[in-house]
Amino acid sequence: MNNSMIIEKGNNRSVQASSIDFGNIGIDEITSEAEHLLNNIAEASESKGLFTVKTADRWIEQAKTRPIPKMLFGEFWFEGELCILFADSNVGKSILAVQIGDSISKGSHIAGFKLEAPRQSIIYFDFELSDKQFETRYSKEFKEHYSFSSNFFRAEINADDSTLHGFSCFEDYLNDSLEKAVVETGAKVLIIDNLTYLRTENEKAKDALPLMKNLKGLKNKYGLSIMALAHTPKRDFSKPITGNDLQGSKMLMNFCDSAFSIGQSHKDKSTRYLKQIKSRNTEIIYDTENVCLCQLDKPHNFLQFEFLDFGYEQEHLRQLSDKDKKQAISEVMELKEQGIPNTEIARRYGVSEGAIRKWIKKFNAIQSE
């Protein structure tokens, strides 16, 4: 016989079990159906309007059923993360991003960086290069072209499509098109080059917020891993890279899961370094004391980053002249007057705390003369 059960909840909620034919199924199926019913009851009671409220232990039990995030590009980017890669113009953001995408699509790691995830489809949304510019990077003088995996999709804006197709603004049309591309290709990894095209005013918190909400919503809905490229505004190349150097830094940093940056060495213009800025799945390993040194190379038909070694960021920053040092000491004294500790000042200037103490001592000596 068919039995349909309705269990009433105290706050006028009810959860209805699916019909169970007890005559035709075994105890295992009945147990499974009962567990499913209990889960539905629990989920109904945990829903508090906008929020889902559970005990900490229940959240952990739920998390146990989810896969452990795997590395996509060493400790810099893990599966399921919304990651931001930011740098100044012309240091190689797009080159590294394509290289990472190629690595993931083939399931083959980049030398010096771990890849734990199996190969999977990616879409590279290219708002920077034309197809011909892309071709020249991945060919030898427009011949002997590099062979990408069939898992690697590249997308660019359709220049012939100038209408909004019923959408109220370009951003809405763009976001809808991003989602359609994900659904139709089945891609699990998105690389967006770059954020500026998605939202032209992302340096302002009020404009960055809907952008990041949309990307996080897309990530959660389809179980995606997303890397978004971004620019840095004009920065002082004598100071270490920090999260404050990201355009629209505060809001973008709050919403991303991880972030890293590319710096250009002032000691050797062909050298680049990679530095972790934010991470939620691992500790910060590649900080100012341990940056990854790389060089740009094109051994045949693939422009790429080649890992060299590890080093100190300070060695690759612009060295201060005597005039610059005097200005820096003056700035340090202003920060001291604001009550900022030596450790924080040292971090901002990429020097040791001992160096800051020497600067302060030198300033005081000059003042007492």
Image (tube, rainbow, N blue to C red):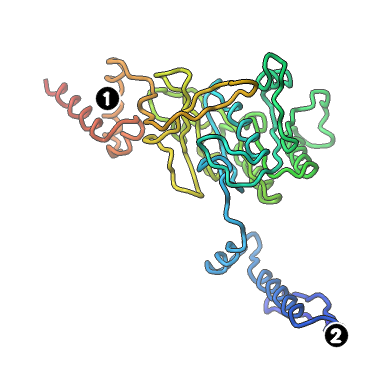
Relative image position of residue 138 (x, y in whole percent): 67, 22
Question: Residue 252: x, y in percent?
Answer: 55, 39
Give the number of the disc on residue 23: 2
Mark toward the start of the polypeptide (1 vs 2): 2
The reply to whether dot 1 and dot 2 touch (C-beta < 8 Å) is no
Quadrant of the rendered image containing residue 316:
top left
Looking at the rendered structure, the kind of residue marked 1 is: Ile
Q: Residue furthest left?
A: 369
| Side of 365 relative to 192 (left or right) | left
Q: Which element carries disc 1, helix, strand or loop?
A: helix
Local secondary structure at mark 2: loop
As drawn, 68 above or below 128: below
Q: What residue does disc 1 label?
A: 329
Q: Position of residue 11 (x, y in %)?
A: 68, 76
Residue at point 61%, 47% (across, down)? 117
| Label 1 vs label 2, nearer the camera | 2
Point out the image quarter for the C terminus: top left
